[in-house]
Amino acid sequence: PDLGIDQPGPYDDDGPSKRSRYVVSGVEVAVLGERVQYLGPDGKLITESLTDYAKSKITDRFRNLDTFLAAWTDADKKQVLVEELEEQGVFFEDIREAVEKTHAGAFDPFDLVCHVAFGQSPLTRRERAESVKKRHVFAKYGEQSRRVIEILLDKYEGEGLKAVEDIGVLAAPPFDQVGMPLELVSSFGGRDEYFAALRDLESALYATG
């Protein structure tokens, strides 16, 4: 969605490379490092921390961690929920940069939400992917299907969940070394079964136990 990035606004200017600009519910919000600035209803400039701003937007939608976890689990496509939060003022790229200053590794939106809004220690995408690989939770599938899942886990670790949820990824390397997209989907039993396996993969990635 078009969030109004880099539109001119009433803020002090450090140069375009040092800020991001968004429009949230008709209000322009400028992100300056780990701060946000926006005009309040009275026209006065409000400055607050990026994480506090994000926390307020997340908890407006989800009153507690359990509510968020239930919504995340129920979402057929997690990326849709991520984009909804972005439109409501949760600027994941900026938040990720802030979190990664104190926590080494690459984090996806799930862990950023849990950390910023609900005080949970974040896990990196690599930690989540490695945990699934160690548990061998996909032994029930055939060799070709397991290879697809292994590549999906590598894609998740390197690129995030958005790439994994796009079935078009099956046409890209290195999947082409395993089979054609239709063949790969058929190895699971068909399109419905492939998406069921993908949901199982997501459940394994975000298992809280």
Image: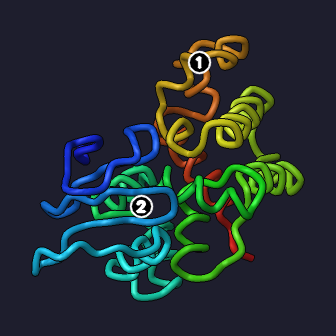
Alpha-carbon neighbours of circle 1 within 10 Å: few (<14), some, or many (≥20)?
A: some
Which residue does the image show at 72% across and 16% down from the upper left?
A: 178
Q: How many marks?
A: 2
Identity, as a three-letter code, of the amino acid under mark 1? Glu
Whether residue 134 sits left or right of residue 142 in the image: it is: right
On residue 183, the disc is 1
The picture places residue 187, in percent across and down from the top left corner, at 64, 28
The picture places residue 7, in percent across and down from the top left corner, at 21, 42
Q: Residue furthest bottom?
A: 63
Q: Which residue is mark 2?
A: 75
200 or 119, which is in the foreground?
119
Which residue does the image show at 74% across and 40% down from the upper left?
A: 141
Disc 1 secondary structure class: helix
Alpha-carbon neighbours of circle 2 within 10 Å: few (<14), some, or many (≥20)?
A: few
Which residue does the image show at 29% across and 43% down from the upper left?
A: 5
Q: Which is nearer the N-term, disc 1 or disc 2?
A: 2
In the picture, the quarter occupied by the N terminus is: top left
Q: Residue furthest right?
A: 134
Height in image: 202 above or below 116? Answer: above
36 or 61, which is in the foreground?
36
Whether residue 205 sits left or right of residue 132 in the image: it is: left
Identity, as a three-letter code, of the amino acid under mark 2? Ala
126 or 183, which is in the foreground?
126
In the picture, the quarter occupied by the C terminus is: bottom right
Which residue does the image show at 59% across and 53% down from the upper left?
A: 97
Front tag of 1 and 2: 2
On residue 101, the disc is none
